Amino acid sequence: MRRFFILYIFLLLFTSCEDVVDIDLNDPEPRLVVDALLRVDSESPSNRVSVKLLLSSNFFEDNTAVNDASVSLLNVDTGQNILLPAEGNNGVYSAVADTDVLTSGTLELQITYNGILYTAINEFAPSTPIVKLEQGTSSLFDDEDIEIIIGYEDPADQTNYYLLDYDQGEYFTSEDTFYPGQYFEFSYFHGKAIPGDTLEVYLLGANQEFINYMNQVLELSGEQGLTPFQTPVSAARGNIVGPNDTSMNFALGYFAVLESYSQTLIVE
Amino acid sequence: MQKVFRLFSLILILIQAPRIAAQETYTISGEVSERNTTESVIGATILAEGTRQGTATNEYGFYSLTLPKGKYTIIISALGFKSVSREIDLQGNLRLDIQLEENTELLDEVVVSEDTERLEINQPQMSVNALKSTTIKNIPVVLGEADVLRSLVLLPGVSNGGEGASGFNVRGGAADQNLILLDEAIIFNSSHLFGFFSVFNPDAIKDIKLYKGGIPARYGGRVSSVLDIYQKEGNKNDFKVNGGIGLVASRLLVEGPITKERSSFLLGGRSSYAHLFLPLFDINNSASFYDLNTKISFKLNPNNNIYFSGYFGRDRFSIEDRFINYYGNAVFNFRWNHLFSEKLFSNLSLIYSDYDYGLELDFVGFEWDSGIQNMNLKYDLKYYLNNNIQINFGLNNIYYGFNPGKIIPNREDSGIVEDQLTKKYANELAVYGDIEQRITDELSIQYGLRWSHFTRLGQDEIAVYENDLPVLYDPETGIYKEAVPTDIITGERSNSLATFMNFEPRFSLTYHWDDQNAIKASYMRISQYLHLLSNTSSPTPLDVWTPSGPFIKPQLSDQIAAGYFREFNNAGLSLETEVFYKKIRNRIDYIDGADLIAKENIETVILNGEARAYGVEFLLRKNTGNFKGWLAYTLSRSEQRTPGRGSVDFNGTTVEEPGINNGQWYSTPWDKTHDISLYGSYQFNRKWKMNANFIYQTGQPTNYPIGQFEFQGLSVPYYGLRNEVRLPDYHRLDLSVSLTPDKNGERRWQGEWVFSIYNAYNRKNAASINFRRNTDSGNNEAVRTAIFGIVPSVTYNFNF
């Protein structure tokens, strides 16, 4: 071989890859939206439970509040019924319930709106206390991200699902398939928090169906990051059941009763 | 079975029928190779002048031609080579090895005899596109890296998901329906860097053929296409080096004799520069890939050739060592060409291939490892019965081991418990026979039958479901749900879980009423036993291949195609038009919200559906002269549907299952109504050459939300029926100029500069439009992602 030389030429001119575009979307037929994740602190004798009712909208507009529905929560096993009156004009309905009513038996949410009855059934999903919550110093994709390290003891001999609420609309789902009965610790990279923020972090219990729903919701909302690929789409059907004959005009949202443990973290 | 028997009787009759009256005949046989490189020449034609007797070389450069005894002028020609003629006096079987010289007279018309073109039109094989490695190197591509897959998508009936999407789609088929063969070995992942480059090193490639329909019986296992790639054998005379230095990667290929004229080696490497590629993603970390192609060829004697070859490719992607991702193919291959007689050619291949995918997530504390191994035995024979009949037959057995995933804690304090998802095993056996027959001077047919047999072997843990239904329909909420296994039983490897068997008839014919015009038609049935599980529009390396089994049926495709072919001798032009219709049974689809990652029982999120595609293709090609190129146009439609499985009882009333997308047909994500590609290459003089492509495609189907709801502080867009709207149309112009400096002259070192501009008018073609809430403004917005704007680049190629 004769002389071998290397030419290193750098002429890379990448143009930016993302921009906001105008898309015309048709106005949908509004659907009832039920945001009913009841977070239950099982160590407290009673809990304030609240449900939010909205009407869905065009993607570029805001949902409108539904204030004229009647909402109640029934413990099917004990027959105890709790009425949730509307708080005001924000679509929120709430009441204080004894913790025992929430943590045992089958619970049914009943909503009557426009003369139509919507129901949903679920059971209390247990969680586990947060053992460790601290801020880390590393980052992953973005230097601005805040590393949050959480640790908890997964209960043995049962399958657990968790929804982690990191505040400011950031969530993470986990199941104990690969850490059954272990102390488990991992990092989450918070994209919105800035130093000085106080984050209320929740470790919520869940079941498999709810976790599947939550994964869909997170994926649809783009919270899991954008990819060059199109997001798998879905109608995001939850567990709210309307009248039989309106299967294509079902209510959106989800009803679940989640055991909740929380801690606060001040971002430095 | 009766049908099959009848088919065989028919075949026997057809073989017997055109026996020519007894006359003493002898066979000329041999190998055709290129003089300088000693590479065998595939598809060279061998003709006896003045007769209509001729043949073509096979994938290993071998030919066999039987003629009545007497004197002949034999003409050997191949596109891009000077034709050679030999006077022979045939008084016995004759071995005639021919060396062709490359036609380097760039400014002269390449002389291709009329007879050659007649022969092409003569062959029943249709729906096939061939690309030479030189063409691939001319086609301007992003970042100046010559690329096989990027070139293929310029052909009619072939498209892909756009920039940054790996794989390709043939005639409306999915990317996992392409059989990709590199020196006869199956390649599972064809892309580097998440789809920006393909795994094939263009310097090491000799010949590429893409079968889109009328696939001969010797191929099977994927329902849409066969991409058959042969690598070079290595130069048996001279030591040669060639390479290139580009913006993203550099490559070097060394070849030469081990023993002159008897054996050769080839060693090719390609490697990207780490850190170069990621500003694209606003990440300051590393992504890199490399490939290694190796080959040793031995010519033991005129009747025996042996080849050892290996391919090893790796991608590595890491973010500050906290997230590491690597994947790649490794292939080892032994082949033995043996001539039993001047009429019977055989090739035995033993192939081991391994696809490996790994992931390390330090911030969660685990490593993930998954992969597929397969052992492949192939024995293919070709018998040149007489000049009118060639018989191909053989068998193929593949043993697969699938590792869906193993999770391992990566450090002491990790809470992760080591776990192995149940490994899966399968065996695929196929036997085929295929006959190419010339019935009259005008009519030739090819007919064959492939019998395939697939066994899903036993595995450690098998999930059992109530009523054998792994997916449940909940009529109350109207959604499909995963069933919970009622039991997990342990299985022995020797007990098969499911077996499938399919007869796959193949048929094609050509009728050419003169030397320039032909009509062709074909029918094929192919089965596919492996499925790629992916719910993105194009495959990612994380996608998992899964074998058919108790809950996943093999895909079964029927395709018919017909076409009109014309050669315009004087202008060096050819026109190919084809129509096709294909239908695929048992195409899997995913229930809404299916999560495919690290899933132990994948059958709980899958329903069996069907797919269909139809269309028309035009290809006008100019192969000779200073201006070469083609215009390809495809008008097509590709759809799938997954109807419900029947009715279920709900509170005493019967409710029909809706299926996916309400059981309606919907466009596949790669459906493109119009697809136009224009490629041209103009040689101004010895120094300058210019190449250009223009592509126009209907935008890919996508989804816009039909509404939005707020849930737990999130804005959630929701969707109606699938793939009802389309992205804006895609179009793009690429240009390149290559400069061969004058000072190259007669010196040994030959250099070439290639300057290219990808997406010359900087169109922001949407790869996707996603809907999200802007975290700064709090407003909802539609965001278009365009991967490449205008990208200029420079590459320097050399050889000595």
Image (cartoon, rainbow, N blue to C red):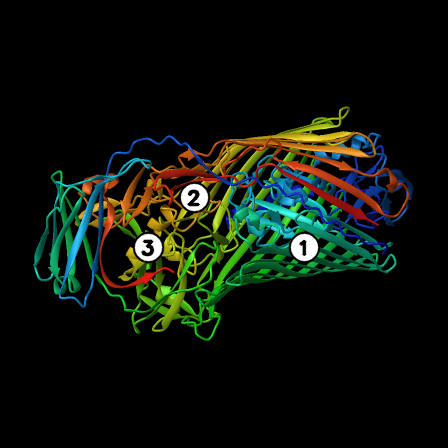
- Which chain hosts label 2? B
Tag 1–tag 2 contact (CB < 8 Å): no
- Label 1 vs label 2, nearer the camera: 1
Rounded to the nearest angstrom, the CA distance separating label 1 from label 3 is 41 Å
Image mark for residue B610: 2
Q: In the image, residue B186 lies at what x, y percent? A: 61, 55
Rounded to the nearest angstrom, the CA distance separating label 3 from label 2 is 26 Å
Q: Residues within 10 Å of mark 3 (few under 14, many from 20)?
A: some
- Residue toward you, A24 or B78: A24
Is disc 1 in the same subunit as disc 3?
no
The kind of residue on which mark 2 rests is Glu
Q: In the image, residue B72 lies at what x, y percent? A: 89, 38
B666 left or right, relative to B157 = left
- The answer to whether one can see residue B382 in this image is no
Image mark for residue B271: 1
Image mark for residue A212: 3
The kind of residue on which mark 3 rests is Asn
